[in-house]
Image: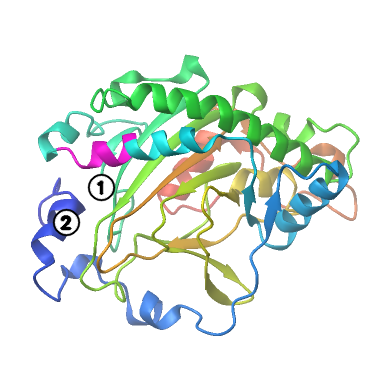
Amino acid sequence: MGERNQSVQSIASSALDTDTIPAEFIFPKGEQPGVTTFDGPVPEIPTVDLSDPDKENRTRSIVRAAKEWGFFQVVNHGIPGHVITKLQEAGTEFFGLPREEKEVYAKPPDAKSIEGYGTKLSKGTQSWADHLFHKIWPPSSINYQFWPQNPPSYREANEEYAKYVKEVADELFRSISIGLGLKDESVLKEAVGGEDLQYMMKINYYPPCPRPDLAFGVPPHTDLSALTILVPNEVPGLQVFQDDHWIDVQYIPNALVIHIGDQIQIATNGYYKSVLHRTTVDKNKVRMSWPVFLEPPGEFVVGPIPQLLSEDNPPKYKSKMFKDYAYCKLNKLPQ
């Protein structure tokens, strides 16, 4: 970028009076959201009611959505509305602070971890987004250096959300594991880190963009994680790739958005696939989202679950430490 540390938020505020954006944010013509978003009848993206008293039906719905889409939304998930609202308000207040206050939490230039406030994540064309990363679970993995002290409500809001989101994650892991046909409901969670799974919060901040037809908040990708649990704000922008089309995800108030990530695809030997998705931006409104990435510890080795393998189903993926997988993916190296 022209100015290495310039936030997209500050670029956006100076670009709003124009109808242009800097060249490094413009994606190649054939990839731009303006020409690749599907405008036909949109298939219904699965929504699962986690309060369904029929446990078998609930499990079946989760398994079907995970298998056919790698993506679904959950409602009546047990996280109180006020907990989600507090999380959103705290994150929104942080991004409303003056730039120098946000820079206190900047990712150190030589850091091995992605934790901290920043802009650039990948090489190539830039994303129209700023972000803040930090772990929220388990407590032993948290580095409070990257948790904003302003607004004062920030820590409590994130700690409260972490307790609830862990319960939702356990329910999802159980159901997705049952879908593999294995008797032990804990097999899948154990295969991707078990109780040592790390919950990485990311706040995405997508400022208004004068040319939303040319830029992406996040370009097409699958998540490194085992599972991603996301809270959006009310401004749409998430798209998933299904049946060779980029499809808009409808905003459902108080729903959580669930993505199957790469580590579940590896552990299940491709039975479940991580979902290809991307984020568009809005011309007039700020879009924000709060994904939590459930990731194995760096040294944890993820590979296909042995009970799933046979002569007819040999391993499709190498077993490797998560940190090595992440390094290869982020640097676009072969796995």
Report crowding for label 1: few under 14, some 14 to 19, many 20 or more residues within 10 A (C-alpha): many
Residue 55 horizontal side relative to residue 89, left or right = right
Q: Main secondary structure of the magenta part?
A: helix
Q: Is residue 92 above or below residue 198?
A: below
What residue lies at 29% left-to-right and 74% top-to-bottom? 214
What is the spatial separation of the Cα atoms under label 1 and label 2, in whole angstroms? 10 Å
Left or right: 52 in relation to 161: right
Color theme of the render: rainbow
- Left or right: 198 with respect to 108? right
Q: Quadrant of residue 152?
A: top left
Q: Residue furthest toward the top?
A: 140
Looking at this view, is 37 or 90 the one in front? 90
User: Residue at (64%, 74%) from the top-left corner?
Assistant: 43
Can residue 76 be seen at all in this image of the molecule? Answer: yes
Q: Position of residue 93 (x, y in %)?
A: 25, 38
| Residue picked out by circle 2 | 1
The quarter of the picture where the N terminus appears is bottom left
| Residue kind at label 2, given as amino acid type | Met
Q: Is residue 10 magenta?
A: no
Identify the residue shown where x is 66% and y is 39%: 319
Q: Which residue is mark 1?
A: 119
The residues colored magenta run 90-97
Between 141 and 164, the one nearer to me in the picture: 164
Residues at discs 1 and 2 in contact (Cβ within 8 Å): yes
Q: Position of residue 143 (x, y in %)?
A: 37, 20
In the image, is residue 96 part of the stretch drawn in magenta? yes
Label 1 SS: loop
